[in-house]
Amino acid sequence: MTVVAAVDPGRRKCGLAVVCSEEGILFRQIVLREDLVEAARRMLQEYSPVEILVGGSTGSREVVAELQAALDRRVCVVDESHTTERARMRYFQDHPPRGLWRLIPWGLRVPPVPWDDYAAVVMVEDYFKAVSREGSGETRGSPPDSKQEGPGSGPARKMSGRSKG
């Protein structure tokens, strides 16, 4: 049983999630950017994840630096391409539309609440898929296509110019 945490960074708010390889989602939360470190501390204390993933686009450099400094833990920066779109679909899997809203095509549905926490869930699910594809039985290593950030690991990889919440 492997437990992994993820942060979907943003300028104003961040999505947090803890997912277990066997039990599924253990924790989801959206926090204001200024409350991220304290929320991450509580999350780590309660769930003790073996890995911390941070999405590699909006605001990730600052988030990685803050988390590493405050938590004294290694953080893996992962590709979060298309996680926002997939998170929206994941939200509707957990909260299916009711009534006439069921008739609206998937592509036009927008959750009534922020879904950054589901983006973090999708990142962890991608991590588990990548690890299982590689055939390794232990997830303590870095996920494929990730950049490990830690003391002496060098600068973060170049981020794309895309912006997201």
Image (cartoon, helix red, strand yellow):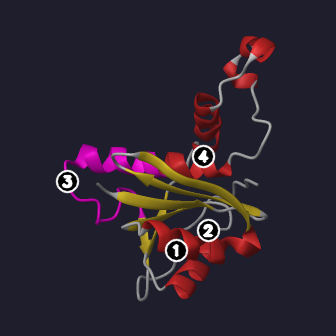
Q: How many marks?
A: 4
What label sits on residue 118 in the rendered view?
4
Q: Crowding near pointer 4: few (<14 within 10 Å), some, many (20+)?
A: many
On whether residue 133 falls in the magenta region, the answer is yes
Label 3 or label 4, whichever comes before in sequence order: 4
Q: Crowding near pointer 2: few (<14 within 10 Å), some, many (20+)?
A: many
Secondary element type, mark 3: loop
Residue drawn at 75 percent across, 75 percent down: 34
Q: Crowding near pointer 3: few (<14 within 10 Å), some, many (20+)?
A: few
Identified by mark 2, the residue type is Ser
Q: How far is the residue under mark 1 from the one under mark 2?
A: 9 Å
Front: mark 4 or 1? 4
Secondary element type, mark 2: helix
Residue drawn at 56 percent across, 67 percent down: 158
Q: To which residue does mark 2 refer?
A: 60
Mark 1 touches mark 2? (CB < 8 Å) = yes
Q: To which residue does mark 3 refer?
A: 136
User: Percent x, y for residue 13?
Assistant: 74, 62
Identified by mark 3, the residue type is Ser
Front: mark 3 or 2? 3
Front: mark 3 or 4? 4
Q: How far is the residue under mark 4 from the one under mark 1?
A: 24 Å
